[in-house]
Structure formats: structure tokens, C-alpha cells
Image (cartoon, helix red, strand yellow):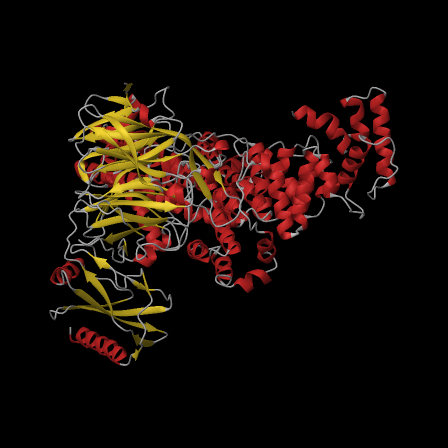
Amino acid sequence: MKRYYLIIMTLLLVGCSEIVNYQPSDKMPDIYPDYVGVTIPVGIAPLNFNMADDDVDRMTVTLSNSHGDSYSVNSTFAEFEVEKWHQIVAKTKGDTLWVEVGARKSGSWTKYRPFHICVSADTLADRGITYRRLAPTFNINSIYMGLYCRDLANFDEQTVIDNKLSDQMCINCHIQNQTSTKDMMVHIRGSLAGTYIKHNGVEELIDTRLDSLLSVCVYNAWHPSGKFIAFSVNGTRQSFHVGGKKRIEVYDKGSDMVVYDVENHVIIRQPVLMTGMCETYPSFSPDGKWLYYCSSLRPENDECEEFKYDINRIAFDIEKGCVYGDIETVVEASKDGRNASFPRISPDGKYMMYSISDYGTFPIHHPEADLRMLNMATMAVDSMTIVNSDDAESYHNWSADSRWFVFCSRRDDGMHTRLYIGHVDSDGHCDKPFMLPQKNPKRYYMELFQSYNTPDFCDDMVAIDHRWLLGNLKKGARKIELK
Amino acid sequence: MDKKSLVARIMSNAVWLVGVLLFVSSVYFWMFRYPAHLAFGEQIQLFLLSIDYFLPFLSYPSGMAHYIGEFLTQFNYEIWWGAVIVSLLVVLVYVQSYAIISRETSRYGIVRVLAALVPSGFVWLFMLDRFSLLAMPVALVVALSFIQIYQLWLHRIGGRIMRHVVLVLMSVALYWLFGAATFIFGVFVALNEVFRLRDFVALTHIVAIVLMPLLAYVFVPFPLQRLYTSNCYYKMMDERPSLSYDAEDEEALLYSFLSHYKKWDAAIRKADKKMPDDLASRQIVLHALAEKNLLLDRLFEYPIIQRKDLISSQSGDMREPMSVSDLYFSLGMINTAELSAYNMQQLYFGQGVRAFQRLAECNIVKGDYRIARKYLNALKQTLFYKKWAEDMEKLIDNANGVEMHPYYGVMRNRLMKETFYFSDKELDNILAHSVNSSMDAHSYDYLVAYLILSNDLDKLAKLMEGNTNRMPKAVQEALVFHWMSKNPSFDGMPWNIDMQVMRGAVDFMRMMNEGGNMQTMRPAFGKTYWYYNTFASRKSK
């Protein structure tokens, strides 16, 4: 026992003596992910990080706050214990968490200038996020595609559904109803196909193939009442760039909008939104009185570069499940030769976040794609410079309390989309977003060859009973009538 | 020694003789008759030497067999190693089967040998399918080993109930680690105990076999059918192995192998004996000719060449389309090459070293080093691609290094700087832009060949304006044909055309006017552009 004690003490002394002999640096540490100056909510999983330099083999990290609390770790990367992390972050709520980093490279230690992490006074109301993960191409159903649910308080991830059920299964366009998991839907494509809908805990599988529509139902939005889902039907096409930075274009050779009546199991035509224009990407206002969507002229010869979407809205009759009245243009991006898509209204109704790009239907494939935030009261547009990057940003969604948003960005390596969470304060100012934390982020993201997309907050962890689903897919989904 | 005792001695040693013969014939078969199947299996998997890679294999039934199978398959990188490994498994199954049978009965010597050949023969047949995985033979060897252990020791475990409990637990562990092939252990134990000891409690082993996949169904999200058959034995989840020798498939995979390793002379030599029927293989032959600067001289030497044999995106009717990416890469169509590599991974349901190498190459040539680093990082964790990945890593963030590199420097020069949408109908424009941007002979040859095979002679003539150099045979034939269709004589023809070609063109026209048809013209003109234009290309339409 004495011998072990001596060994431990010797190791500790050796470790201490190394750290004492550090070289001070006036620079901030170059860490991965870049958590310098980000804003986080209380309750978020530990923001573990690595030094960007692969040659660093040891790190010491000390977290401290203005109340005198501190927590130190010494490891190959900054790996915090979940409980201790939560404790210090909770005590720093509405304040600044300081992070002091020492790194050992080639036997010598460097201590960097401390950086800060802002702990917001706004808590995150939702428990987790759901997202799809798949290979970063779209022309064949992806291998190992799945929908997953991540607990934001730790690193737990559970499978909602993945394509282990069938070789050619494609799972897409899932969504909760304003983060509530009581209502959710997922499309399943392939030899076994259908649209899974859960409403007030009751599950069903519907078949939306109807001859008179352009396609099966595609992009979607729950009506806040849960009684309706607005769908677009899209004649989706793909083109592939032979050279250049962009690789793929996804666009619609025509698209219309319909509304699915969840309780009466009928699809209701919306003639006003089934025109020669391309209407897509529905989204309801939080009060359910307006349906927002994107609209573009359908260019001659379907030239992808000519698709320039504006964001419109039209009144929605909650009793009949129909739109009515005049179409109002909310964001006229085409006037400036640009393209607006994915309108998402914050649940408090104050802001609308959307993607802006040069053209096309899928901004995520465009490096120039950025997020914008429209103040619904003043109609002022925030260019969100602290949120955007030189690579694509898209697929954004709001938390239930309208203070946080999750989005996809390709800034990590230019190809694989990763998830980021950003904060909007009560005055509508955005803070620097942070990458979805992982236990060993550098290793995790380096070894992940899939992209994230369509993230959405969720109030609870979700899973779909794959046996129930497979059984019903084999039996055949319920045929839906068109009204 | 008299004849009778000699025969008896031979019979007694037959098991070893058969074993040796089996091993030798198997090694010969896999090395010389079916090597491309071994290479294919290695190229479509990515086996990493890391604990993180290993642990997920323990989370589903047959995962350990899957892992060991992948571990062994990586050695197919050297074909002879792969041949020896498959052969050893085949022989092991035979030897173990013989030992098990012999322990049950010492009679029927030759019949025992023949019976022991049945499971090993099945393993051999099973591995003939390109998507069969070594996990199955590995699982079978393990199951047979446990049967042998049962015969030697386990059956003696005292206490009937205790013995059955131990054996059932063993069955469960075997099933989880090695999958459905280990059911034979439970079946053997049950039959042995029932018939030898009249112990009908042993039927619980059969019940266990039925229940184990049902139990696994609770824990893993696989369809029940796959838990009864172990999906890790076969790459394609919803299909079954063919269990038959497929020479055409081997040929397609062999051409793909030659393309991957840039063995262009071997591909041409093989095609000289017989031009393949498969579209991808035909494209590889023409690609090989282009790499050896022979494309335009020998374009019509092979029977019934079509434009799609040169380049096309139609991979649906290809037996082995991985080489499509090689072709696009060589032409500087990097995004298309990259996309093909992704498609191949999706088509074959898994990440593969060949696709990863291509994705790393594409992104190094494009200068997207952050992406390249990801793929190289994975390849550095493999046994056989570590060195390659480390060498490639030196090109990361090293524009000068790439430009000076003997191969990737050329590829970067060929890189298409402008963006175009890929389209079969626009390939001539795409190739023309490639030629204009890189001034590269390889792309130029493809453009010229494309115009010739498209019978787009106006464009060809325009491209050749002012060119007074001696041109390759196919170009001369096409230009002469073009000239003759618009002029009464060769007078004023602006190109340097061989006298022999002009004579040939005149002869061709004369014979056609005399009523020549596809059959009568073939002996003299079957390998000319004129024949292609008049008969072959029309036939294809």
C-alpha cells in the first residue's frame, strides 16, 4: 500500500512540477470546437474541447466564475464530469465562466490567456434535439441513415428510427409540433413507405400517394393546434456540378401546397397555393392564423439558377383547414436577386428566421447560404453576422421559449454539416453559437462521415417502436383521400 | 507391400490427402480463377485497428464473427494471403467435420471423407458471391470447434440439468458473438443427447435456437428474419448469396481491379484476347488505351464500340461501376468522381478503403484539405493503407507539393475550374471546357473520341482546323469520311492524311456502292471509323 502511495505522490509531484514550469502566452488557445466567447444555457452538456494542435498530448483546464467557484481537469483533452460541469455552470447563470487552458506539447507546457463562456440567464426549455444523420449526398438512399434524439444535458443519443429495418429505406423530413413530442411526423421512403404521424399519443401510418398531386407529401409544418399539417408536394430534381465548390443542386420542377387534416384523415387541396408558381416550405405562425411559405416563379427550362424564392404568408382558417384571403409577401428576396427559404417563426411570434442564398431550393448545398432574422414588429432584418460563416448555414429551428435556435452549418470542414446552438436575447441580439457538445469532440467529428440535417428541439426524448412501424409498413400505410 | 494393403493405407490416409488437395486446389482457385472477388471484398470494407471500431461489433448478434471476418478480409490486399486464408477456412471446416464424424463412428471410411467435404464445399460455394463475408466461415469454424469440445469434454459435465444449463448458456453466447451458424452446435448437442442418452430434456437446445433470435429482437432493431439468418454473413441485407461460379462477375471485378491499380497494359492485353461485354469493363479498356496514348489509334479495333463505352453516367447496367470514378477523376471531373465514390459506398452499404482513397484524392486535388484530412485520418488506422495515407498527408495545406507531385500535379492541372452540371447530353461541352482549361492531352483524346463516336464530324473538323500534324488513325478516318461527304475529291483537304487511309476510304465507298453490307464489309473494314459510322453506330441506335 505504501508503495502505491509513493508512486501516486511521485506522479502528482511530477505532474505539478511540469505545470509550474509553463511558458505564459498572450494568445488565446486554439481549441476545437471554437467555444471561445460562446453563450450557453444552464443545463447544457459539458463543453468538452481539444486543442486544435494534434501534437498537444496533455491539457490542464480550470473553470472559474466571479463567485469564487472553480473546477479543474487534467487530461489529454478538456473532459469535464457532467455533474461538476452542471454545478459550476448553474452557479454562473447570467454571468461569465472563465476558462484557463494549459497545454503540453513536446514536453513543455504553455499557459494561454483565459477565455470566457457566457452563461445565459435564459434557460433552455427543451430537453433535447432530434436530427437526421446521413451521408452528405442525396442521389441514392443513404447507408446508415437515421433519425436520432440527443439529450442536451449529457451525451446520450438514442435512435428514433434508422434504416436497419430495410436496405433502401430513406427517412426524412421529421418534425415535432413546436418542440412538443406529443405530435410528430416522419416520412419513410423506399420499398416500405409511408408517413408516420403521432398525434396526442396515437400513431398512424398514412400513404400520401395521390395521382392528382405532384408527389407524395414532402416538407411540412404542424399547425399549433395539432389538427393539421401543411405539406408541400414537390417534383424534386437534382443536378450535379462537375467542378467548382458546389457539388449538388436540389430543386423543384414544380411544387404545390396541401393541408392534411390529422383527425379526419383527408388531404385538403389549397387551390390558391397550387398554381404555376412553385410553393414550398410551409410554416405556421404560433397563433395558427397564418401560413408562411416560400414561392418562386417557375423558370423556363427549369434553370436551377433562376429559382428565387420569396417568403409569403396567407391567412389560415382553423375550422376548415383552408387558406383564404390575399397573399402577402413578407420577404421579397427575389427583388434583390436573392433567394429566401425555410421560414421559421419563433414561438413568441417576435421573429422569423430564414435562409438566404443566391438561388435554388436547398440552401445547405450553397456556401453563400446564411441565416437572417426578421423582426416581425419592425420588419427589420438582422444579418446575424456573429452566427453566420463563410460556409453554408441552414435548417434552423427555434426552442419552445424562443431564446435558443439550432441550425446546421458546414463551417467545420466545408462538407459535413454539424449542429450549432445559438442564443437570442430579449432585445433580439444574437450571441456566438456553439457546436453541439460531444464527449471527445475532435475525435467524434473527425471520425463522423455523416452530415446532420433537419434539427429540431424536443421537449422529451423520443423513439418510434420499430416493430410497430415495420409491421405497419409491411401491411401497407393507410390510404388518404383528397378533398 | 501388396496392392491390397497399399489401397488400405491410401484409404487410411485419404483424409489428409483430400485435405491437402482441397487446400491446394482452393488456393489455386482463389489466386488464379477468382482473385478479383477477394480484392473486391477488401476494397469495399474499412477495417480500423482501434478499440472504438471494435466495440460496436459486440452490440448485435454475429458481431464478433463480423469483426473477425473483416479483420481477415483486410489481408486480401495481397491476393495470395486472401487465397490462403479462405482456403485455410475451407480446409479447417473439412478437417473439423471429419473429426466430428469420426468421433461418432469409425465405420464407412470414404463416406466419412465425402460427408466432411459437404460443409467445406458449402463454404467454398458461399464465398463465390461477391457480397459473401468471411463472417460465415469464421462462425462455422467456431461452432465446429465447440462441437468438438463438447465431444471431448463438455458432454461429461456432471449433473444432467447443470450440463444443459451450461450448454444452453454456451449456445446463447455463441449465437450473440457468432450468429446463426452456431445453431449447429445446439442441434448437435440436442441430437446427441436425445439419441445417445435418451435425454429428451436436451430438446430445450432446439427451443433455445428458436427463442434466441426472438430474444435478440427485443434488444436490436433488426428484422426478425435477419436475426434467424445473421445479416452479417452477407453484405446485402435484403438479398441472398448466389452460391455459383460467376465468370462474368469475376471478369468485371478484375477489370475494376486493374483500373484501380492503373494496370493499363494488363487491361489492354486482356481486352485484346476478348473484349468484355460489361459496360464498365469496356470503359476501362478505352480508359486504359487513353492512358497509354493509344485511344485514337485503336478506337475501332474492338468489336461494336459505342459512345457509351467511352464515357457515360449510366451505371445501372454495370456489373462493377467503381471504376467510373477512376475515369471521371482522370478527366478532372473531380466532383463527379467524388459523387461516384459516394454512390459506390451507398450501393455497397458500407464505407470502403477504395472509396475513401478516392475521396481523399479528390479533396487534395481540389484543395479542400479539411475534408481530405478526415478520410486520411481513417485510412491511417488501417493496416495496409497507413503508409499511403501518411504520404498523402504531406500534401495537406501544401499547394506547391500537390502541383509538383508527379500524379496529383497533373490531376490538379486537369481539374475543371468552371462549374457545369453533369449531363450525358453535354459531355462534349464538358470535355471541351476541360481541354480548354487544362490543355491536357488525355482530356483532348477523350473529346476527340467522343466527337468521333457521336459522329459529330462538323465539330471534329472544326476542332482540327489548322492541325497539320500526323493524326491518329481513327481521326484520319473520320476526317476523310467527313471530307468525302462534302467534296468530290481529296483536292484541297487541309489535313495530313496517310495515303493508306485515303485508299481505304475510296475502297470502302466503292464496295459500298457495289452493294456491300455489314457482313461483307466487316473483314476488310470492321476496324475502321467508316464501318462504325455506316453499320455499328446505326445498329446501336
In the image, residue B169 sits, relative to residue A58, either above or below, namely above
The x and y percentages for residue A12 are 21, 75
In the image, residue A435 sits, relative to residue B66, either above or below, namely below
Residue found 69% across the figure and 30% down from its top = B304
In the image, residue B245 sits, relative to residue A381, either above or below, namely above
Residue found 48% across the figure and 33% down from its top = A302
Residue B88 seen in render: no
Q: Nearer the viewer, residue A157 or B29?
A: A157
The x and y percentages for residue A458 are 20, 42
Q: Nearer the viewer, residue A361 or B274?
A: A361
Q: Quadrant of the N terminus of chain B?
A: top right
In the image, residue A151 sits, relative to residue A105, either above or below, namely above
The x and y percentages for residue A301 are 50, 32
Residue A219 seen in render: yes
The x and y percentages for residue B422 are 54, 39
Q: Nearer the viewer, residue B404 or B438?
A: B438
